[in-house]
Image (cartoon, rainbow, N blue to C red):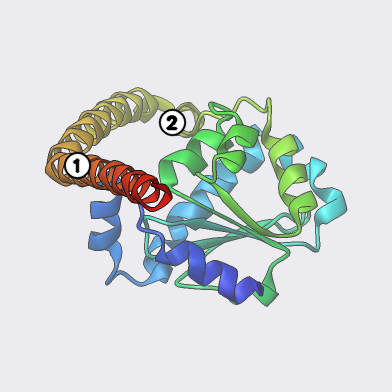
Amino acid sequence: MTPGHARAAVRQAPPPFSPVLLLGLALKPVRPQVLQPVFDAMLGVIRRRHPDILDRMADYADKPVCIDPTDLPFVILLDPNPEAPALTVRREIDPAEVAATIHGPLDMLVSLAEGKVDGDALFFSRRLVIEGDTEVVVALRNAIDGAGIDLVEDISLQLGPLGRVFRGMAGAAIGLVGRMRDDFEMLRASLIAPAVKEVDAQAARIDALESEVRQLRKAARRGSAA
């Protein structure tokens, strides 16, 4: 499978039904250039608070990585060159431009960056999908592993007196998103429950019919032998 085909296959998989998906729909008409200052500021915070991350990527300075949040309408191009790192927001990217691409829901990507989840488990469960040079992705994961990244705390410490306000607002927003995610999951379960029940009922009917067919065949063979 070519890289382009692999990317298409990932994109065709429906993203999780979550508040982030609704945010992605709202951001769809927004030009990536409008969002670029946010990622420039985020990279600046990481460079000041965790400079060792980029130093550990020095051997892969010429191997950019595409980070693809599957529930958002854009991708992020990470240039890990310690001398001139960059996080660039793009609408899409040519797989030939990057050494590797990581696909996954935004919350999983953030949790991975903050070291809150087991990256191997996510990759093996296919909740995160890698294309291209896996060695680069492993190096990136090792670079951020144990770095103690906490995006809310890191940003709040850069805001001086406003940090406490930002921390409180971010905590409230994260709590709201968590409650919304639970509500979305409950709604999703209630919507698909009738379909699951019907599938189970059909499977039971098929099993019963197959059992009846087997019994009829046995009876027919006994009649032929007689």
Residue placed most toward the observer, 175 or 186: 186
Tell me the residue that label 2 is attached to: 152
Residue 33 picture location, percent across and down: 42, 70
Outermost residue to the front: 226
**In what quadrant of the picture does the N terminus appear?**
bottom right
The residue located at (16%, 47%) in the rendering is 195
Q: Is residue 135 left or right of residue 200?
A: right
User: Which of the two labelled residues, at mark 1 and mark 2, occupies the earlier sequence position?
Assistant: 2
Q: Is residue 195 left or right of residue 3?
A: left
Tell me the residue that label 1 is attached to: 188
The quadrant where residue 19 appears: top left
Residue placed most toward the observer, 92 or 78: 92
53 vs 129: above or below:
above
Residue 120 picture location, percent across and down: 65, 35
Outermost residue to the right: 59
148 vs 141: above or below:
above
Residue placed most toward the observer, 30 or 3: 3
Residue type, label 2: Val
Residue 199 picture location, percent across and down: 22, 46
Tell me the CA gap for discs 1 and 2: 29 Å
